[in-house]
Image (cartoon, rainbow, N blue to C red):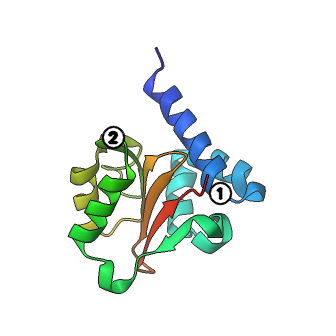
């Protein structure tokens, strides 16, 4: 049986392969397995320099409601749970229920990445730049 750490490592690797530009994967992986670097990385995360552009779907301002995004997250996931990477230490590095987690992220002010299905779908919210994006793999 896999430990949670092994499960998370596998999820990060799958996410990286599906969504991160090939040349940036090694740096992404090494950064996200280091707690201190991960928080700094989220703060300066430039989505357009690291995410495969064809997987990035900007949520229009008119659709940035809590209900719309939550319903879309639920429809993109095969599970009630998600994995969270966040600069909010309470949420970071947790496997948690999507609805409860999303509510805290949506109404909070943390930069956060919600991995729904590591090789197929995720959501990123970067507060300082007011970015809200779905990540959907074309594979």
Q: Between 100 and 121, which is closer to the camera in this rendering? A: 121
Q: Residues within 10 Å of mark 1 (few under 14, many from 20)?
A: many
Residue 57 location (% of width, % of height): 50, 71
Q: Is residue 118 above or below residue 110?
A: above
Along the horizontal axis of the image, is 105 left or right of 11? left
The residue positioned 57% from the left and 53% from the top of the image is 37
Question: In this view, which residue lies farthest toward the right?
Answer: 23
Let me know if residue 46 appears in the view: no
Instruction: Name the element at disc 1.
Output: loop
Residue that label 1 marks = 20
Residue 84 location (% of width, % of height): 40, 49
Are dots 2 and 1 in contact, CB under 8 Å? no
In the rendered structure, find residue 63 and report the number of the disc placed on it: none
Residue that label 2 marks = 79
Q: Between 76 and 114, which is closer to the camera in this rendering? A: 76
Residue 97 location (% of width, % of height): 26, 44
């Amino acid at each position: 049986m896999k430990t949670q750490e092994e499960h998370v490592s596998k999820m990060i690797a799958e996410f990286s392969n599906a969504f991160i530009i090939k040349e940036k994967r090694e740096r992404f992986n090494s950064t996200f397995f280091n707690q201190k670097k991960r928080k700094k990385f989220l703060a300066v995360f430039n989505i357009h320099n690291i995410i495969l552009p064809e997987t990035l779907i900007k949520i229009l301002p008119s659709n940035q409601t809590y209900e719309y995004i939550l319903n879309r997250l639920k429809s993109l996931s095969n599970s009630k749970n998600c994995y969270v990477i966040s600069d909010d230490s309470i949420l970071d590095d947790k496997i948690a229920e999507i609805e409860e987690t999303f509510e805290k992220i949506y109404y909070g002010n943390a930069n956060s990445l919600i991995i729904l299905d590591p090789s197929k779908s995720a959501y990123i919210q970067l507060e300082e730049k007011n970015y809200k994006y779905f990540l959907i793999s074309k594979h």
